[in-house]
Structures are given as structure tokens and as C-alpha cells.
Amino acid sequence: MGRTGKIHSVETCGTLDGPGLRYVVFFQGCPLRCQYCHNPDTWKISDGKEVSVDEIMEDILKYKSFMEFSGGGVTASGGEPLVQYKFLEDLFKRCKEEGIHTALDTSGCISISNVKEVIKYTDLVLLDIKSYDVERYKVVTGVAATSTLEFARYLSDINKSMWIRYVLVPGLTDDFNDIKQLAYFISTLRNVERIELLPFHKMGEYKWKELGYEYKLKETEPPSQDMIERVKNIFKEYELNIK
């Protein structure tokens, strides 16, 4: 059966997590507790469904023609896929043997030394940077600053294709000075193809309630169009491709 791991669910025709039509595998387990997380049901690895690489690949191959036609592939999301880096490595290795494009949606919060093999089989990294500021990072995620920026620098050093994702939350991640520092940092990297600015939404709020967690952002509204444009302009000042 091959190596097994814990997943939350799959999405067979995703369009938001990389180019083309994507088969998205949502991995179970995450060390972060982001205030705006819309998948809190992926936090505990013990809650996941155990599956083998063979089982997932059997299903993935049913959609291979759709992926090839659309320029898509397989995306590992979560949760945090790198929590299960050995399982992910085996999955991505099999995907590459089948000629399938691979994308990794990650916060980069795992030691680089553990995941270099995974990166070898990864075509594109979708790196979610929570904040450039150390103190703000802890407020956003509930944990001390991780190796995200170091991870980004490593990907630049090996010239691995990367999209940067930034979630814009009024009152939490909308500090313009922090964003400007982040934009400057990204401008020093050589491998960033685009920036995806993701406006805050409350689509996962009901999950927090169901799980008995306190949702601290229930009074927070999505960012205004004016705020979104101001933030986009900061990234554009550094000649970054912002979506």
C-alpha cells in the first residue's frame, strides 16, 4: 500500500491553489493557530482519515487528463502539509513519476533540513507569509515566529518557483509599515512569480463554533476596496506582480 498519512479531505477540481485545475489534498495537522483560519478542523492530526499514497494516486489519476488540458496538477494544502513531510515526499515523488505538476501550499514553518527532499519533487510553492513583524506573527498565529522568511530565502537560493500569499485582515495584518517591510523583503528574492493578496472572510467561522473554539474575529469586517488597493500599491512600489 505504500506509506500512509492523515488527510482531512480532497477537492478534485480546485481552481484557487495554483495554475489550472488542481486536485487538492488537504492534509491533517498544523502547528499554527491563525486567528483567521477557515480550516480549524485540520489542526489536530489525530482527527484525520488515514490513507495510503497508493489510494490517493489511484484517485488522482482519474483526473489526469483534466489537469493536463488545463495546465493544472496536484496541490498539497491543509492544515500544514509539511507536518507529514515523509508522506508528502512519497506522494509528490509519485506525481512526478506520472508527469503531474505539483504545488505545495505552506506556511514554511517546518525546519528546512527536514523538507529538502519534498522540495525536490515540488514544482511550485505557495508560501503563506502571515506577517513580517515577529511580534505581530505571534499575535496572528498564536505561536512564536517560525522559519517562514528563512524558508523563502532558501527557495530563492535554489530558484524554486514561488507565489507569495498574504491574508489582509483589518486590525490584524493591515499595518502598512509591516506590509512595506514585507514587500521590500520579497523584492530581494529572485523566484517570486506573483503575490496573491487574500482579503479576510468569515467563511470558516461556523467551524470554530462547532469545535468549541473562540473566534476572535467575529466583529471584524472584510477589508474595504480602498484598503485592498492601498496594500496592492505598496507591493507595486517594489515592482512586484500583485494579484
Image: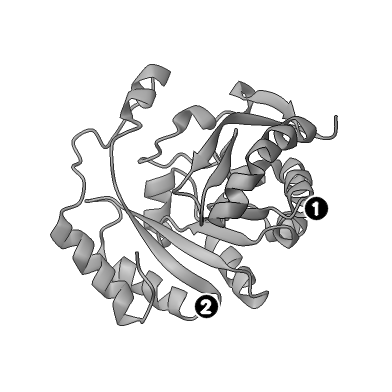
Say which quarter of the image contains residue 240. Answer: bottom left
Crowd around label 1: few <14 · some 14–19 · many ≥20 (10 Å)? few
Q: CA distance from mark 1 to mark 2?
A: 30 Å
Where is residue 36 drawn, in percent x and y? 35, 41
Where is residue 173 drawn, in percent x and y? 30, 55
Residue sitting at the far right: 1
- Quadrant position of the N terminus in the picture: top right
In-front residue for pair 72/102: 72
Q: Tell whether 96 sits left or right of 20.
A: right
Where is residue 194 drawn, in percent x and y? 44, 68
Residue found at x 73% / y 49%: 95
Residue found at x 49% / y 64%: 163
Say which quarter of the image contains residue 182. Answer: bottom left
Residue 24 at least partly seen: yes
Q: How many marks?
A: 2
Q: Which residue is mark 1?
A: 97
Where is residue 176 drawn, in percent x and y? 25, 67
In-front residue for pair 60/201: 60
Mark carried by residue 35:
none
Q: Secondary structure at mark 1?
A: helix
Residue 109 at least partly seen: no
Crowd around label 2: few <14 · some 14–19 · many ≥20 (10 Å)? some
For badge 2, the amino acid type reads: Leu
